Each structure stands twice: as C-alpha cells, then as structure tokens.
Amino acid sequence: ILNVEQSPQSLHVQEGDSTNFTCSFPSSNFYALHWYRWETAKSPEALFVMTLNGDEKKKGRISATLNTKEGYSYLYIKGSQPEDSATYLCACNQAGTALIFGKGTTLSVSS
Amino acid sequence: SQTIHQWPATLVQPVGSPLSLECTVEGTSNPNLYWYRQAAGRGLQLLFYSVGIGQISSEVPQNLSASRPQDRQFILSSKKLLLSDSGFYLCAIKADQGYEQYFGPGTRLTVT
C-alpha cells in the first residue's frame, strides 16, 4: 500500500515569515505528485502536479520541488500571509492507481 | 471545464438509517470518479473509485458501497449508518487526459 507522509503535522508562523513543508513517498513506480490547498468547509484546491525528477513549480509566493529518486517533495511559502492559513495536502499515485493522500500540514499564519 | 456537483451539502442522520450521497459531473466524458472521506482527526481517505459505468473498486472494508449507474453519476450508499461514518465526503474526478484530479464541494455527514 502506497504510504504518503507529511511533516510537520501543524505549523504556526507570523505574517511575513517564509516556511516549508515536506512530503515523502515511495520512489518505486512513481507516477505523479500533487499538492493541494484545503480550507475549512471548502473542497481541496489543486496547487501543483509534478511528474519529473527535479521539477519545480511556482504560483505566486508558493513553490514546490520534486525529488523522485529519494521520494520527497517540498512546498515553500514565501512571506506568509493570514490568507495562506489552510491545510496543505500532498498526494501521490503510481501509474493507473488512485491518489493516496498524506494527512496534511495545517498552517496558521498570525498577523 | 468540468463541474462537480454534490448533494446534499450537509446531512444529519441517526445511527442505523440508510444513506445516499450523489455526485454528478459536467463538462467531461468517461472520467475516473472517486469518493473520499475525511473523518474527524484523520486525513483524506480514498473509499471507492470507478473507471467506468458499473466498475467500482473499494479501497477499504466498511459498511459503505458505491455505484456508477451512468457515466457522470457516482453514488455513495449505506444500508445502516454507524457513528464512525460521520465525516466530510468528497467526490473527485480525473479527466481522461492529464494528471489533475478535481474535487467537488463535499457533503458534511453527521451521524447521531
């Protein structure tokens, strides 16, 4: 069974701080790595999908990297804002299989 | 672009009652469809997925079942709800092309 681990479980930062989270996954038979942003009472919003080793994606102040050989991905948020407060989910799948999600990192940003 | 509808948005049901949650999709054909659940204090768990009409795969043993009577309709059911069935249920789709998976608005189920 594919196991996706995220750390830390939760994180509290001050407005303006930069932060990063980790997602680890089995490197064998890797197909794609997804990052989602999930706010309470809403559906998860897709941030990035990465498939190639060394991929880097960026959307505004948020960026992500992928290392498929060692089985990890980092999500970075530069200059955190209160509106960045959410749970950030990582998910991974092997070819032909459904996404398996980690438990998420819950970020709280104080102004 | 595809749109995912889920209803009801919220539901409160007594233990032992039946359940039917519906998910319908617009703007795509022959999608892969998924049911996920987030129970209190837990991560997002895959319950069922379907690659076509009448084709259902179950990821975890439970008292829930799923059906796909039409290409763009996915139903989650139970004959008798348990307290542990409470949670936030999300329907998701993956288009035929590409890697992205998109989620519906979800149903908040509370079993009392």
Image (spheres, coloured by chain):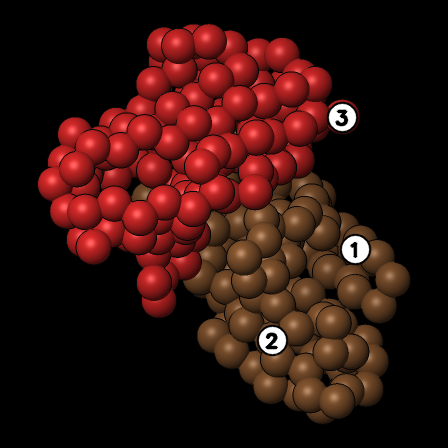
Chain colours: A brown, B red
x and y percentages locating residue A49 in the rendered image:
69, 44
x and y percentages locating residue A60 in the rendered image:
87, 62
Which amino acid, by three-letter code, is at mark 1? Glu
Q: Quadrant of residue B79?
A: top left
Q: Nearer the viewer, mark 1 or mark 2?
A: 2
Is B93 in front, or is B86?
Answer: B86
Q: Quadrant of residue A37?
A: bottom right
Residue A56's mark?
1
Please give the residue where the numbered disc 2 appears in the rendered image: A107
Q: Residue at x 48, y 42 (%)?
A: B9
CA gap, disc 3 to disc 1?
Answer: 25 Å
Is B41 in front, or is A63?
Answer: B41
Q: Chain of mark 3?
A: B
Which amino acid, by three-letter code, is at mark 3? Ser
CA gap, disc 3 to disc 2?
Answer: 30 Å
Please give the residue where the numbered disc 3 appears in the rendered image: B1
**Left or right placement of residue A78 versus residue A89 in this view:** right
Question: Do marks 3 and 2 share a chain?
Answer: no
Q: Relative to A106, does residue A12 appear above or below in the rendering? A: below
